[in-house]
């Protein structure tokens, strides 16, 4: 399908995950994600969508949850499987695109998508969010980050970019932003969240000044 042509950032990250280890910043779980997982019932079914090398999946499994770690990168799923084996943890590592999740409807109590859904154009984002809604049980929760439109001037100051479709940009140079990324303001983000009730939504930089991301927690409607 045409929309898949913009869903290519995993090609960059596959190379990065081959080099990553326990010293990588991508090995440290985000406190907000862990704090929410601690509110879930023991043994909850959690999908870590875009798991990378497993920083959240490993923490969730260590806490006693049933964890599936999904990524489009072969290096990522291999890293998660190896780390889980080394720690004696049961994690199902699955390689698949976020736009076509290989799970039954209402399979999960909680879905985490940290720094992943925005890798593609709006059709990719919409399809990925529709799939998240499908696999999350009614009353289940979804936590995610999305690139904020506030970040666009920061990226434009660093490298020449062009908007290839609505809210979707690619930039010259190195890094994963040579692949399409979706930047959004709050009204656009809310319009994408069909099937969910937003519980928390805020915009803040990540580790670097100007690295604005939306952070959201939502509940799946029945």
Image (cartoon, grey):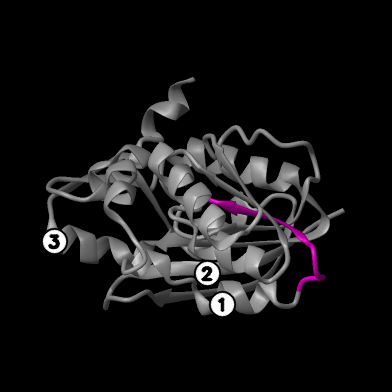
Label placed on residue 15: none
Q: Is residue 210 above or below residue 77?
A: below
| SS state under label 2 | strand
Do labels 1 and 3 touch, CB within 8 Å? Answer: no
Q: Is residue 216 above or below residue 69?
A: below
* Nearer to us: label 1 or label 2: 1
| SS state under label 3 | helix
Q: Residue 97 at what x, y percent from top left?
A: 52, 35
Disc 2 to disc 3, C-alpha distance? 24 Å
Q: Which residue is mark 1?
A: 32
Disc 1 to disc 3, C-alpha distance? 29 Å
Q: Quadrant of residue 101?
A: top right
Image check: 169 left or right of 56? left
Q: Residue 63 at what x, y percent from top left?
A: 68, 71
Label placed on residue 215: 2
Do labels 1 and 2 touch, CB within 8 Å? Answer: yes
Q: Which residue is mark 3?
A: 158
**Residue range corresponding to the magenta coloring:** 40-50
Residue 138 covered by magenta stretch:
no
Front in this rendered view, residue 62 or 199: 62
* Nearer to us: label 1 or label 3: 1
How dense is the environment of label 2, judged by Cα within 10 Å: few (below 14), some, or many (20 and up)?
A: many
Among the two numbered marks 1 and 2 on one chain, the one whose residue lies closer to the N terminus: 1
Q: Residue 145 at what x, y percent from top left?
A: 50, 63
């Amino acid at each position: 399908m045409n929309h898949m042509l913009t869903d290519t950032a995993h090609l960059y990250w596959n190379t990065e995950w081959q080099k990553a280890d326990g010293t990588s910043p991508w090995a440290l779980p985000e406190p907000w994600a862990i704090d929410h997982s601690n509110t879930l019932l023991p043994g909850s079914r959690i999908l870590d969508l875009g798991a990378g090398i497993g920083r959240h999946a490993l923490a969730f499994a260590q806490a006693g949850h049933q964890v599936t770690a999904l990524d489009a990168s072969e290096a990522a799923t291999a890293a998660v499987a190896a780390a889980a084996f080394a720690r004696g943890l049961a994690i199902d590592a699955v390689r698949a695109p976020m736009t076509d999740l290989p799970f039954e409807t209402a399979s999960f109590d909680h879905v985490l998508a940290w720094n992943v859904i925005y890798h593609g154009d709006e059709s990719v984002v919409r399809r990925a969010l529709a799939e998240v809604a499908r696999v999350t049980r009614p009353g289940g929760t979804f936590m995610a980050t999305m690139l904020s439109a506030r970040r666009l001037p920061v990226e434009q100051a660093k490298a020449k970019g062009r908007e290839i479709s609505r809210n979707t940009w690619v930039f010259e140079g190195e890094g994963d932003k040579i692949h399409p990324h979706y930047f959004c303001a709050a009204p656009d983000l809310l319009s994408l969240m069909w099937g969910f009730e937003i519980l928390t939504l805020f915009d803040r930089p990540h580790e670097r000044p100007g690295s604005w991301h939306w952070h959201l927690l939502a509940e799946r409607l029945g």
